[in-house]
Image: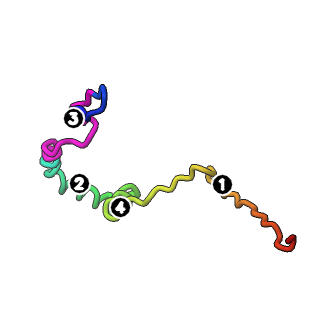
Amino acid sequence: MADGRKNNKGKKGNRGGRPSKAEEQKLIEKLTPLEPKAHQALKNAIAAEEQWAVKLFFEYMYGKPRQQHDVTTGGQPFPTPMIIAPSMDDE
């Protein structure tokens, strides 16, 4: 299926994209019987104060916190530029 541009042959489907609804439904049906066991395993891990389990619970319950990326200073304090304004007395 081409989009009208010259020499664009297009591609059939989106192989790397989201799975089809049918595939997703099959996966849900396959995993549903495991749900009580998964919840019990998570409860046991939280009761044992496993750090990964507590983190997993909060990430699913409240959402993952945003990751902050420092791409400019490498973790060092950002240097504050010195701004020198001309004096107004020169006029």
Pick the front one: 82 or 19: 82
x, y (%) of residue 68?
Answer: 50, 56
Residue visible at 62% across and 50% down?
74
The reply to whether dot 4 and dot 3 touch (C-beta < 8 Å) is: no
Residue at image mark 1: 76
* Amino acid type for the residue under numbered disc 2: Ala
Q: Residues within 10 Å of mark 2 (few under 14, many from 20)?
A: few
Q: Nearer the viewer, mark 3 or mark 2?
A: 3
Which quarter shows the N terminus?
top left
Q: Is residue 30 visible?
A: no
Residue at image mark 3: 13
Give the total of numbered labels.
4
Q: Which residues are magenta?
A: 9-27
Which residue is most to the front?
Answer: 91
Secondary structure beneath label 1: loop
Residue at image mark 2: 38
* Amino acid type for the residue under numbered disc 4: Gly
Which quarter shows the C terminus?
bottom right
Q: In the rendered image, which quarter is residue 2 located in?
A: top left
Residue visible at 21% across and 34% down?
13
Between disc 1 and disc 2, whose residue precedes? 2
Indicate which disc residue 63 carries.
Answer: 4
Secondary structure beneath label 2: helix
